[in-house]
Amino acid sequence: MNSTLKSALFWLSQGVGVLPCLPGSKVAAVRWTPYKDRLASVPEVVSWFSKPRNLAVVCGPVSRNLVVLDFDSETLAEEWRRENLADTLTVKTARGMHFCYFVSGLPRLASPQGVDVKASGYCLTAPSTHPSGIQYTVIHPGPVLEIEASDLLHHFPASSETPPSDASNAPSSPPHTEHLPWSSLIGEIRRTLPVVSLLARYTQPIPTSPDGRWWIMRCPMPDHEDHHPSFWADNRRGICSCFHPACKSKQPGGKPMDVINLYARLHGCSNREAIFALAEEIGL
């Protein structure tokens, strides 16, 4: 049994949801929306992690109210370890540490500077490899500490922010994107990740023009069993679409998709979730 599968089965035995992510990436390798409300089965987990995959844990109610405190610097994390509730499963990340807790009666908590309080969405854990190439490692094997919400409220006050209705289970916004205006963040994602590069993870694009602008391929959508190339991409404009009417009708407004719409459609998530996931993946 490989180490990733062993770790995934451990988390599942603790009542925590797990997800496969693409190798070296934070991007889910399956439509993760169904797993907001249910745990994956053991056969699903074995199937996912019998091949090279990163491992993510699902935070929030489906996972016994799992909360991960994501410290983005080792200095801040070490201060927490010395002075607070640090006798819990702890993972060293690319830049800092994750402290994992089961929290009863959890309110929505504010994330102070340098810490991301992950009480929804999902996050990578050991032995995954961060997009930077650094491997996540367990530095305190746990168990996961069970605490009351009041134990965290002393350090992380309840947030007064009301999340948008379509993002109640969205991953928390990466701390390093806070300085970017929303429109700039979207523009940077579009510039950094060509639509054909994302499509190549799920299907085999075939160039149809010598300048690399036009491509065709089998449709990558999980609900479209495509036996002939019926999906096209314009890499210059960063858009793509399916020719098949039934599949095309499921695209936003029935119009061509950009890289964000495409990611959301492939993973069954909102555009907001797609933006956060892609921003983290490309290091924004």
Image (cartoon, helix red, strand yellow):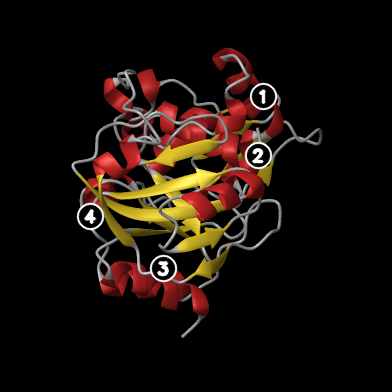
For the residue labelled by badge 3, is the local secondary structure a helix, a strand or a loop?
Answer: helix
Is residue 174 shown left or right of residue 73?
Answer: left
Q: Amino acid at mark 4?
A: Arg
Between discs 3 and 1, the one toward the N terminus: 3
Looking at the image, which is closer to me, 216 or 157? 157
Looking at the image, which is closer to me, 228 or 29? 29
Which residue was labeled with disc 3?
Answer: 48
Q: Are marks 3 and 2 in contact (CB under 8 Å)?
A: no
Q: Is residue 39 above or below residue 34?
A: below
Asked where in the image residue 248 lies, by quadrant, the reply is top left
Q: Are marks 1 and 2 in contact (CB under 8 Å)?
A: yes
Query: Is any part of residue 202 visible from this angle?
Result: no
Cα distance between the residues tagged 1 and 4: 36 Å
Cα distance between the residues tagged 1 and 2: 10 Å
Which label was assigned to residue 282?
2
Which residue was labeled with disc 1?
Answer: 188
Cα distance between the residues tagged 3 and 4: 22 Å
